[in-house]
Amino acid sequence: MIRQLGSFVLLMIQAFKRPDKGSVFRKQLMYEFQSLGLESMGIVLFVSAFTGGIAALQTAYNIDNPLIPLYLVGFATRQSIVLMFSPTIISLILAGKVGSRIASEIGTMRVTEQIDALKIMGINPANYLILPKITAAMIINPFLIIFSVFISLLGGYVACAVSGIVTLSDYITGLRYEFDPFTITYALIKTVVFAFIVTAVSGFYGYQTKGGALDVGDSSTKAVVYSSMLIILFDLIITQLLLA
Amino acid sequence: MIEARNISKSFGDHNVLKDVSVSFDRGQTNLIIGQSGSGKTVLMKCLIGLYQADKGQIIYDDRVFSEISEQEQMTIRKEVGMLFQGGALFDSKNVEENVMFPLSMFTDQSYEEKLERVNFCLNRVNLENANKLFPSELSGGMIKRVAIARAISMNPKYLFCDEPNSGLDPRTSGVIDNLIKEITEEYQITTIVNTHDMNSVLEIGEKIAFIHQGNLWWTGNKEDVLKSDNEELNDFIFASELTRRLKK
C-alpha cells in the first residue's frame, strides 16, 4: 500500500513536469477534451435526464403529509441533484467510462512497448500521456456537471408535467426556494477533485501494467474500483470540510 | 561508439549479467546474440538506459551515461533510434504521424518540412504511398519498416534493433537486415542488433558479441563464427541438423 502510494506520488511528480513542447501539449489537450468530455455527454445526458425525473417522482410519492407543501418536491430534487447526484454519481459513472478507457489505453501502450519508445526518444511518457488527461478532465468535467444539473432538473420538470403529481409552478417554486449559490461552488470543487482522482488513478494503473492482455484488463478493473472508492472517500472528506 | 564496461545486473537473487564489457563500433552492424534467457535483452536495455545497471558504466562516445546530468541523458536519448521487436508504433497515429512524431516533438520545422523528411524516410525504407495507413492496416514487415523510418527520422547517431526479424518470413527478414546494414553504412550510425536469427548473424554480423549465461562468452565477426571452436557458440549457432551439415 505504502509502496503503491510512493509510486503514485513519483509518477505524479513526473507527470506534472513542464511539457516537452507546448504546441504538442495543446494538441493533446484538445484531443482529450473531445475524448474525455464531449464523448461522455451522451451518457451524462441519458443518466441525468432519467435520474432527475426519478428523484422528482420519488420525492413526490413519498410526501403523504398534507401539511408539507408540494413545492418541496422541486426543492428536494434540486438539493439532491446539486449536492450529491451530479457531482458524485456522474463522477462515479465517468470513473467507469473514462477511467477504464485511460487505464486500458495506457496499459496497452505499456505492454506493446510504446511507452518504452517514448522514453527512448527522450520524451517524458508520464507527462506526455497523463498530464493532458488530468488537465482536460479537471477543466471539462465541471461543464459536464453543470450540464448534468441542468438536464436532471429538466428531467424532473418533464416527470412532473407528465405524471401531474406536482404542478409545474410548485416544482419551479421549489427549485428557486432557499437557493444557496455556495452549493454550486461545493459541487464544482468536488467535481474537480473527482476528475483528478479518476484520471490520475487510472493513468497510474495503466502506467504500472506489466504483462499482456489479461493484465491490461486487470489494470482497467483496478482503475475503476480504486477511483470509485476514492471518490466516495473524498466526497465524505470534502463534505465535512466545506459544509460543516 | 558505445561501450559497456563491467556491467552487472540482477533481478532479485538472479544474476542476469555478470561483469560484461564490450564495445560497439560506429558504421558497423554490431550483433548481440545468445539463447533465450542468456541476458542479451537485459544488456540491450541497460545500454539504452531502460534498465539501470547495478554495476559498471555505459559510455556513448566518451560520455558516461550514469555520470551525466538528466538533461544530458535526454540529449543522448534524442540521438538514439530504436526498432522494437513488435515495432511499438503508436496505434492512434497513422504512418505519417508516427514517423513525424519525433520531428514534431524536437524540432521547430514547418509541417511541409516535416512532411518532406517523413516522405524521404518512408522512401528510404521502400514504403511509398503508405502515409495514411494505420498500424492495424500494416503487415509485419511494413510495421518494421515504418519503425525503422521513425527511428532514422531524427538522423540518429545510435540505432538499436531488438529482434528485428521476429515473426517475419525469411525473405522479409533479409530485406529488413539489408536495410539496417545499408542505413548503418550510409549514415555511419553505431547500430546494435539483438537477434538469434542465424541468417542475420551470417549476413550482417560485422561484429558479434555472444552472451552465454550472463557472461560475454565470445566476440568476432560473421567469418569467425564459422571457424570458431568455441563449444557453447557452436552449440548455439549450429543447433539444428541442417546448420551442422552446412558447416561441414
Image (tube, coloured by chain):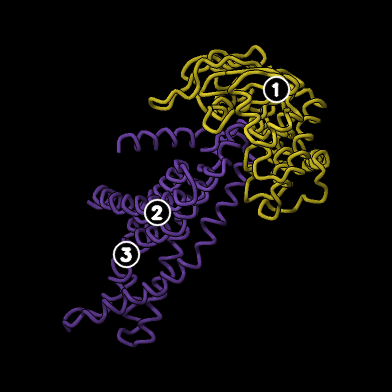
Of residues A49 and B229, the one nearer the viewer is B229
Q: Is residue B191 visible?
A: yes
Q: Residue at x 40, y 54 (%)?
A: A221
Determine whether the residue tagged by mark 1 lies in a helix, strand or loop.
helix
- Residues at marks 1 and 2 on the same chain: no
Chain colored purple: A
Is there one chain holding both mark 2 and mark 3? yes
Three-letter amino acid code of the residue under disc 3 = Phe
Q: In the picture, residue B155 is in which quadrant?
A: top right
Q: Position of residue B167 (x, y in %)?
A: 65, 45
Dot 1 surroundings within 10 Å: few (below 14), some, or many (20 or more)?
many
- Give x and y (percent) for residue B141: 72, 46
- Which chain is home to disc 2? A
Label placed on residue B29: none
Place residue A187 in its image quadrant: bottom left
**Amino acid identity at mark 2:** Thr
Nearest-to-viewer mark from 1 and 2: 1
Residue under pointer 2? A221
Badge 3: chain ID: A
Residue at mark 1 shares a chain with residue at mark 3: no
Gap between marks 1 and 3 measured at Cα: 85 Å
Q: Looking at the rendering, which quadrant does residue B189 occupy?
A: top right
Can you say whether A81 is above or below B67 in the image? below
Residue B7: x, y in percent?
Answer: 52, 17
- Please report whichever mark, 2 or 3, sits nearer to the chain's N-terminal start: 3
Q: Colour of chain B?
A: yellow
Residue A179 marker? 3
Label 2 to label 3: alpha-carbon separation:
39 Å
The numbered disc on residue B225 is 1
